Image: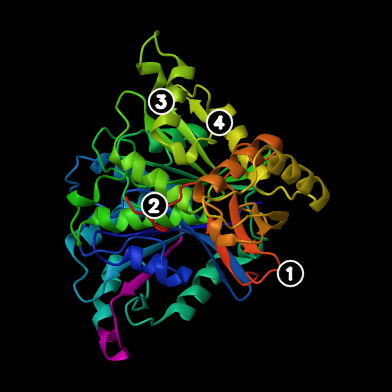
């Protein structure tokens, strides 16, 4: 049995997204004074004492969206209500009830769902009398809360769990076997891909750039395995953003999604040239040592002369620091090659969790050293002794040598390339540490190598 769903509903700017973050105990939704920031349904698991439930944030009811997405936002609200076991009707107690609050109340009565009326922005008990007028909405006594002042959380959670009853005692859903972040520049087709995988319009799709503003977690089953697909906001050049731009927040949410993902699907628009945003996103993924698939989307639009091998070579030329990453040509609209790409993502996650035995590893290292040792241009000889694996996700190896500082970045790239060719780690990023052997005077020296030496540790689009 799935966990009961609780939907947060209300007009714009009453604090719905703040309430989601408040009850979940962490920042999930973007909170901004701009009306209509939330467009899609955002979900969070909430656990409290003896119960748990899935909390769903929705867009503002009645918002006049400047991108012409009012109907789509309304559809997402209604889908959340239909699936919900309980509705949290949020009202700004300092201003309400306004005519649009009454319109929300009328809409909710059509669905005949249990409703808890939440009087937000009551920062202290002295303001509680302001909630008296909310009885006119017809949903009983309002529950006073203040997301800003962290007031009223426990009483509200207790009321929610009482309404849900035994359904809230169900065990939590199993942890996903794969967390896949779908990233890319604006209008690359990320939301269309997520909806196709989910088999439903889970996120709003529009030709208007910047439709998705937040990172949206979508749980689904693929080949009888639990998968979490993370739809992220499309990224544009940082030079076109301002500090208070909503896309500035979206960018940081996308970067956070990359960090918490097991595998990243970097979506490339096959109808456009690879640009600066694609390059910066790839650099950020490489800096995080995340397994990545280059998903060449809209492949159905490039014509019959398109050659997948030629495009893969183009990808490798554009992203040399990720030369090992697989390329998948696909169409999010038609579903072409999506199942194969999902299986590839699962395989990459498994590959990144591989631990090589010390014996087999050093046999491979010996073969690499026979082919080419870590020589230097100086007179000092460089000798490699052995290697060991110390971590997975990403696979992390330590190569012990007598002169760590003299091992060049070029040799490290050679060593990693050879290691991939000779092991099962052919398509995953590898972290390499070069350290002094315990028997040398350089034993305290260490140097970390990545597949993109010289790149900043945290490049940002």
Q: Position of residue 418 (x, y in %)?
A: 64, 38
Count neighbours of disc 2 (C-alpha within 10 A) and say few if under 14, some if 14 to 19, many if 20 or more.
many
Q: Is residue 153 above or below residue 343?
A: below
Magenta segment, which residues? 114-129
For mark 4, what is the residue?
341
Horizontally, residue 334 falls left or right of residue 169, namely left
Q: Nearer the viewer, mark 1 or mark 3?
A: 1
Q: Which mark is residue 31?
A: none
Q: Residue furthest bottom?
A: 126
Q: Which tag, 1 or 3, sits closer to the chain's start? A: 3
Which of labels 4 and 1 is toward the front? 1
Among numbered discs 4 and 1, the one appearing first in the sequence: 4
Residue 414 sits inside the magenta stretch: no
| Closer to the eye: label 2 or 3 | 3
The residue carrying mark 2 is 254
Nearest to the observer: residue 91 or residue 329: 329
Give the residue at mark 1: 439
Of helix, strand and loop, which one carries label 2?
Answer: helix
**Residue occupying image coordinates x 31% and y 23%:** 271
Q: State how far apart marks 2 and 1 are (Cα).
A: 45 Å
Distance CA(mark 4)–CA(mark 1): 47 Å
Name the residue at the front extreme.
379
User: Relative to the observer, which residue lies in front, 61 or 427?
Assistant: 427
What is the spatial separation of the Cα atoms under label 2 and label 3, in whole angstroms? 25 Å
Numbered badge on residue 314: 3
Label 4 crowd (10 A; few <14 / some 14-19 / many >=20): many
Of mark 2 and mark 3, the one earlier in the sequence is 2
Q: Earlier in the sequence, mark 4 or mark 2?
A: 2
Could you tell which of marks 2 and 1 lies nearer the N-terminus? 2
Discs 3, 4 touching: Cβ within 8 Å: no
């Amino acid at each position: 049995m799935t966990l009961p769903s609780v939907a947060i509903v209300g007009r714009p700017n009453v604090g719905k997204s703040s309430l989601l973050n408040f009850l979940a105990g962490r920042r999930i939704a973007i909170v901004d004074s701009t009306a209509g920031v939330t467009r899609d349904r955002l979900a969070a698991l909430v656990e409290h004492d003896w119960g748990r439930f899935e909390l769903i944030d929705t867009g503002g009811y009645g918002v006049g969206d400047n991108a012409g997405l009012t109907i789509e936002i309304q559809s997402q609200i209604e889908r959340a209500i239909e699936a919900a076991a309980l509705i949290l009707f949020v009202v700004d107690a300092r201003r309400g009830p306004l005519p649009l609050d009454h319109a929300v109340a009328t809409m909710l009565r059509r669905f005949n769902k249990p409703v808890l009326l939440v009087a937000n922005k009551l920062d202290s008990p002295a303001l509680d009398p302001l909630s008296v007028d909310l009885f006119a909405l017809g949903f009983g006594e309002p529950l006073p809360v203040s997301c800003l002042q962290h007031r009223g959380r426990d009483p509200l959670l207790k009321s929610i769990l009482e309404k849900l009853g035994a359904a809230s005692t169900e065990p939590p859903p199993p942890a996903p076997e794969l967390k896949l972040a779908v990233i890319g520049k604006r209008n690359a087709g990320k939301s269309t891909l997520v909806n196709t995988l989910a088999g439903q319009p889970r996120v709003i799709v529009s030709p208007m750039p910047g439709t998705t503003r937040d990172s949206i977690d979508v749980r689904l089953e693929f080949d009888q395995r639990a998968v979490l697909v993370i739809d992220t906001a499309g990224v544009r050049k940082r030079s076109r953003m301002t500090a208070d731009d909503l896309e500035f927040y979206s960018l940081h949410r996308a970067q956070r999604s990359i960090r918490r993902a097991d595998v990243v699907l970097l979506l490339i628009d096959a109808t456009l040239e690879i640009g600066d945003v694609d390059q910066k996103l790839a650099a950020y993924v490489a800096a995080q040592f995340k397994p990545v698939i280059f998903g060449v989307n809209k492949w159905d639009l490039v014509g019959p002369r398109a050659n997948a091998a030629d495009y893969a070579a183009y990808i490798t030329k554009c992203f040399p620091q990720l030369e090992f990453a697989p390329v998948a040509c696909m169409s999010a609209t038609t579903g072409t090659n999506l199942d194969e790409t999902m299986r590839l993502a699962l395989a990459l996650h498994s590959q990144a969790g591989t631990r090589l035995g010390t014996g087999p590893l050093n046999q491979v290292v010996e073969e690499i050293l026979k082919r080419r040792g870590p020589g230097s241009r100086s007179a000092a000889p460089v000798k490699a002794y052995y290697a060991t694996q110390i971590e997975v996700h990403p696979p992390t190896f330590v190569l012990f040598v007598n002169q760590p500082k003299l091992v060049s970045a070029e040799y490290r790239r050679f060593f990693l390339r050879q290691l991939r060719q000779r092991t099962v780690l052919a398509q995953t990023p590898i972290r390499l540490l070069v350290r002094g052997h315990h028997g040398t005077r350089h034993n305290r020296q260490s140097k970390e190598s990545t597949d993109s030496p010289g790149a900043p540790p945290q490049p940002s689009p």
